[in-house]
Amino acid sequence: MAELITYKHASGMTLYYLPMTDSPVTAVNFFCSIGGSYFDLTQPFKPGTAHFLEHCLFGGRDAELEAIEQLGIQVNAFTSHYTIAVTMTGMNDHVLDAADKAFRLFFNREFSGDVVETERSIIHSEIDRSNAYPWTKVSNLVDKEIGNPHHPHFYPILGTHETLDQITHDNLVEYAERIMVPSNTGLVVAGSSPEYFSKWVAKMDDLAAMFSGEDPRTPLNHRLKYALPHLEIKDNIKFRHVEDLGSESAYVMMVSSVSFDDYENEAVRWTVGNTFADTGMSSPYFKRFRDELGIGYQVSFGGNVDSGALAYRMNEIDRNRVDEFLNEFDSFMGSLEKHLTEELLEKTINSMLTQQLKANMKPEFRANYFISNAHFNQIMGLTKDFRFPGFYLDKIRKLTVDDVLVEIEKIKKTPRTTFVVTK
């Protein structure tokens, strides 16, 4: 699989080119590397401004979007904590032809006050729907518990009803002018064969011409005010009942704070998360809960620059049996090594390899992964080298039970906070 090609344009923009030989499909992400996490409670840029801007850039532009889609292009936009981006996926030549149309939408500053109010109403509805979902409540509580008011994840990307109502049309235009400067933006192209590289380099010239002059000031950067701190658990809470809506059901999430002290060890940590899930589902503790109560069990491992969190997520549980369940979980954690066998680890690894190899064949996966993970790691100075998860496959194949148990012992020694939200 071809390595990443990086091209620095004279304007300050960067092209990240991920060639996939013989791929008829190209995925493109045009991004600004300032997203939902850049805000200042004392300034007009309130939480939710980036997401609000994304809505307004495309609001009322149905004709332009339809012209792109008529070329067979799937076009979308999204806001993450660290990025605002427009994405396209389609046949190689068609995506190249549609790029200018999509880029112009990204530079739209002519949205009217009516568009702003329409999109504000839509986002209010999105916030209501998000807040009604139990896992949103859990996720927001976890972010606040392990962070602090200056942590970028302290506020949701959507903002709140209160912050949304404080954002004006002028705030949105000013925000766009502040963040959308060449040195803050870039282009990720995945899937085109190598011979398309020169065509996308030429496209960078067209893109650079759309900016309204040179950078007016030093580009904004998350590190200026909201540098990511180490995640900290405030106290080792055994159990926290965070909300009671009168239901007989409960959702549970347990979070362990885990240090990312060795980024190159990501392959092991990635495997550990999957091993937890597979070991848990095969252990007698969780078999009983699954068979008797139909409880689903999910594990995820994620994090940011310096720290990470291993989350154990359980679906609906009889609220009267939550304490019983948590005791069972402690027993499972204490005897995990008894259930982890070479056979189970081999099964887990084979499943991971199959999933990852399939994912790596998709241009849209490679482009989106770069935006959401590798690009963030680079701009924050975490690693100089870009790697997809797929590049760790050889390392994962060589893992042993002892390798995984070493990481599990670290996790078992970290504080664990338990959140329970009743539906």
Image (cartoon, rainbow, N blue to C red):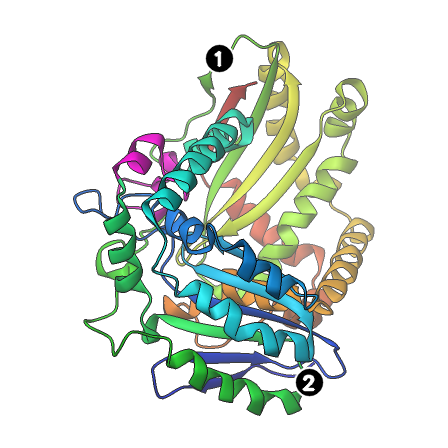
Nearer-N-terminus badge (1/2): 2
Residue 183 in the figure: left or right of residue 395 = left
Query: Residue 78's x, y, as percent?
Result: 50, 54
In the rendered image, residue 192, in percent from the top left (x then y), is placed at 66, 80
Write down the region rendered in magenta: 144-166
Look at mark 2 in the image and give the residue it sits on: 193
- Which residue is nearer to you in this view: 409 or 379? 379
Q: In which quarter of the image is the N terminus?
A: bottom right
Q: Which residue is drawn at 58% across and 70% down?
A: 28
Query: Which amino acid, mark 1?
Result: Asp
Judge by depth and name the residue closer to the eye, 315 or 322: 315
Placement of 360 over or under 292, stated as above or below: below
Quadrant of residue 331 within the rendered picture: top right
Compared with residue 402, is residue 254 higher up or lower down, i.e. above or below? Answer: above
Report the residue marked by disc 1.
244
* Residue 161 located within the stretch drawn in magenta: yes
* Residue 226 part of the magenta segment: no
